[in-house]
Amino acid sequence: QQQVKQSPQSLIVQKGGISIINCAYENTAFDYFPWYQQFPGKGPALLIAIRPDVSEKKEGRFTISFNKSAKQFSLHIMDSQPGDSATYFCAASDPGSARQLTFGSGTQLTVLP
Amino acid sequence: DADVTQTPRNRITKTGKRIMLECSQTKGHDRMYWYRQDPGLGLRLIYYSFDVKDINKGEISDGYSVSRQAQAKFSLSLESAIPNQTALYFCATSALVGRGKETQYFGPGTRLLVL
């Protein structure tokens, strides 16, 4: 049972373009939504996170947009750079499940120079 | 030096063999996790531990066992390895930082191939 659905599976963007990755969830108990970034040969690392009491959070070129009523959230990477090429995972945390993180299936982003 | 280390980084084993993957952390966190990563499936939780005396099964614990030898050490064992346990395994640690925020810090991973 996949509680967090992520799309697309892969994404190719030109340098300077906008990368958009989408996630949808079913469990309304989720109350914390982080995004993790993983470079080849490395473990995932926290990139940015949001709580559902706000609709948007921006950190540099990275923005999370959150739609509580639709149970969807997305990551936007503005002015995408080749160094952003990585795998991105959305995740969600449920306080009722000891704050376990449920991860999406991942999106492999390639930014062409 | 890395805060979360995993050994070995790569391992090839044969069906039926027992193997152990080890994880150590210097972050002082109480919470530790084992995940496996498979293409198209993301990260799935195998086991987690909130302190030395607390061990909990995750989503896919069948075929695996764990041991929390100390606050800083959490090992994962495959009692009798099978080919569908071929995957990338990650250890992670975390600590709650107010209002439910929790950042997990991942090790570099162990790539396991079961023949």
Image (cartoon, coloured by chain):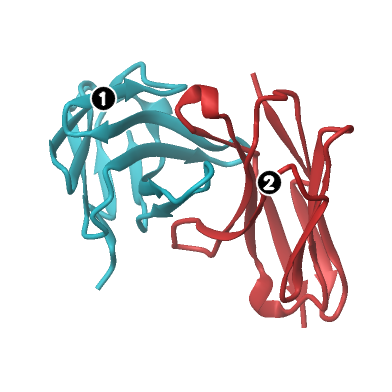
Residue B75 vs residue B110, the one in the foreground: B75
Q: Chain of mark 2?
A: A
Category of crowding for the residue at label 2, using alpha-carbon neighbours closer than 10 angstroms: few (below 14), some (14–19), many (at least 20): many
- The quadrant of the picture occupied by the N terminus of chain B is bottom left
- B17 sits to left or right of A52: left
Which of the 4 image quadrants contains residue A82?
bottom right
Category of crowding for the residue at label 1, using alpha-carbon neighbours closer than 10 angstroms: few (below 14), some (14–19), many (at least 20): some
- The quadrant of the picture occupied by the C terminus of chain B is top left
The answer to whether dots 2 and 1 both sit on one chain is no
Give the CA distance from mark 2 to mark 1.
28 Å
- A98 sits to left or right of A50: left
Position in image of residue A92 (x %, y %): 62, 38
Specify the colour of chain B: cyan
Position in image of residue A98 (x %, y %): 45, 28
Q: Which residue is mark 1?
A: B55
Q: Which residue is mark 2?
A: A51
Q: Residue drawn at (78%, 75%), measured in percent from left and top?
A: A80
